[in-house]
Amino acid sequence: MKPIFRTNTNHTGITIIDPIQRRQFPIRTSNSVDPVSTDTDAFRFPVDSAAEIVTNTLVLPYVVIAHIRTIDGDVLTKVEDFSYEQLPQGEYLIELNAPIRIYLRVNSGVTIASSTERMEFDFDTEARIRIGARSYHDQPGATVTTTATPRDAMTALSTFGSALKTTSCERSLPSLRGHPPEIELGNRLHVPEGLSPPDTGVRIELPPELSMIFPTSSLAYYLGATVVPGDEPRLVTDRGFVHPLDHPQRGFEGEIERVLKQSLFLDCVTRTEGLYQIPLHERRAIEPHVDVAFDELYEKDLPEQIETYLGIPFETVEKAVPTWLLSTTVTNEPSNLEALPYLANNLSIVSTKEENQRRESKPEIRTPIDGFLRGSEAKRSEQRRRNRGSYVAPTRTDSVERAWLGRGMPVSANKIIKSAFENKLERSSSTDGIDITVVCNEREMSPEYDSKNNLYGKRDELEFDIDVHRNLSVDELESVLTTPTDFLHYIGHSNDGEFVCHDGGLSAESIDDVAVDTFLLNGCRSYELGVELINSGSIGGIVTYSEIANKTAIKIGRTIARLLNRGFSLRSTLSIAREQRLVGNQYIVVGDGSIEIAQSESGTPYLCHFDTGGDEYELRITTYPTVDSGMGSVFTPFIDDIETYFLSGGDIGTFRVNGETLRRFLRLEQIPLVVDGEFSWSTDLDLESL
């Protein structure tokens, strides 16, 4: 379903809605408007839908980066916070980096003014404005059936590149990478017509083994490569270039990782010679150290670009490469082939483990000390304990997030369940606001959610519908779980795979059609409950392995809620909580950990670190890419005198700022902080003391 344009009911203007990703972006106008559908070909960039309105003024709900371009796409100027630009009469294309990619085409003089809180476009006269919108969302366009034999699996993997919207270096932009086709295991190989690999002139040769195929999935997708059997792992182009993929130090998996990272990174640098001519920090960092004419390289085809990229020692650019978002450890089971399209869509680094390598001792769990736990006193069944399997240790990496695909219970990583991705694809589209359901089934736990504290919904630009239920019976809770909602925050006891109600227990296994998209089950040992919710229709959630103390759970639950409300994914939310020692190994994500319940105002969620005690502050910013703003996306902080863009992923750098600049930055939105080593929020801080 394409983005739609809806007339606002509470004020003049329109709201642009992405029904699939459930993103909203309201725009105020100086008069009542009625959007009329128009041609999508009027924009230099691809858009999914377009509408036309007539007005004098557009007011955005908050500041976004706006690029003012000619109608041919050339950048004239960039506008962000505290900007004032006057443009003479002319035809302009204005690109808004909002949660939905938006383009405005107008023939008029225009004045653009912004503060910390809003951005306004004033036109010389009542102007006809064409608005184009492009969703960041993509679904698999087809399904490839393959057997478990490695040669057939290679053919299936070769179709991934058919989803790329371009084979130029601009495919480094997440919105120009489509979703790879689904894979389904069957009795014979079947590739639907039209799913042949793009003609990139790149192939990857591998020994026909699953342990070689799994790690290659993201690289084959990103390069649009054909994967074929070979005696040795290597990358080959039609120019005769050969690059071995079994490095003497890094090994096979390490070299695949290096080629993927270096290819995307240098594509991001090279694309600054095209339609996205921005001052990129990473280009400035590496350009003095590489003998590359990026303006000439931009005009080359993919094989020649790859040859140039891999001719640069990785050590030369490694420090400038952003921290990768996701690393996934996969066991060599044929059934895991079906999850590869979803991992490749996230450009996940993939490593493998044999079945006999995966066992891990029980993770260290913090012992509750306050006496009141969130599990009942009933004994846990031995059978259910056996069904949970053994603990497993994913490969240690420096990625922002880690995941595990296979049997067992991962320590400090997302437990991927393939049905979660399928549930996400079947998720119904919606033009409504964000539905939040809170269930508190234990009076002593009620401080975790207090409606006066606005845990959810404190976003002026988003519509939230919050339902709160207390002390539910089994039948009432089952009704809640089968009622569509974007997010369930469950506060209460759990025991032996059941929700504990005042009149008995409710097993998620007994519910055929769960309508909850995402969830936080903040009770003791809620892992089995979460897995069953995924198997019955949910997409992802945060659960627990062990007993949790009530006071600890209250603090953790509130922190998780606030992070999710600011646009962090399930995985990023738990990564932050773990890094700040708010949780240990007892909390994990199950299902699709990339899902978010709300959009980030800045496009990419971020965390800030600084220490107090001086006249100036060293402000360190850590970014957390999302599916929409994934690897290859850019971020710029609204800080005085910072005109540079940074590639998203981990720390983008440290900025020396004075107190006034820091205060102004922290007032932009509700930002999670680490101040003097303690986790906090910008809205909870006494900014005048800085």
Image (spheres, rainbow, N blue to C red):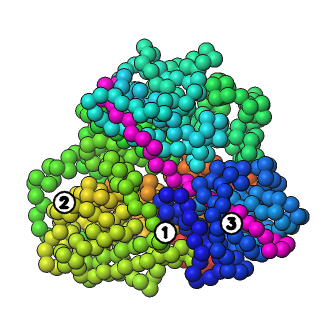
Front: mark 2 or 3: 3
Helix, strand or loop at label 2? It is: helix
Residue under pointer 2: 509
Q: Give the residues in magenta.
A: 123-150
Could you say where residue 266 lies in the image, as x and y percent from the top left?
65, 36
Label 2 – label 1 distance at C-alpha: 31 Å
From the viewer's perspective, tell me whether residue 353 is left or right of residue 371. right
Could you say where residue 515 lies in the image, as x and y percent from the top left?
31, 65
Task: Give the quarter of the image for residue 331.
Answer: top left
Q: Are marks 3 and 1 in contact (CB under 8 Å)?
A: no
Residue in the image at 76% along x and 40% along y: 273
Q: Which of pointers 2 and 3 lies earlier in the amino acid sequence? A: 3
Label 2 – label 3 distance at C-alpha: 49 Å
Residue under pointer 3: 52
Numbered label tally: 3
Residue in the image at 61% along x and 15% along y: 240
Question: Is residue 241 shown above or below 164?
Answer: above
Label 3 – label 1 distance at C-alpha: 20 Å
Q: Nearer the viewer, residue 537 or 324?
A: 537
Residue in the image at 64% along x and 70% along y: 35
| Residue 656 shows in this picture | no
Q: Is residue 129 magenta?
A: yes
From the viewer's perspective, tell me whether residue 488 is left or right of residue 648. left
- Kind of residue indicated by mark 1: Thr
Could you say where residue 401 lies in the image, as x and y percent from the top left?
45, 49
Question: Is residue 54 shown above or below 267?
Answer: below
Q: Residue furthest bottom?
A: 452
- Kind of residue indicated by mark 3: Glu
Q: Residues within 10 Å of mark 3 (few under 14, many from 20)?
A: some
Residue under pointer 1: 431
Front: mark 2 or 1: 1
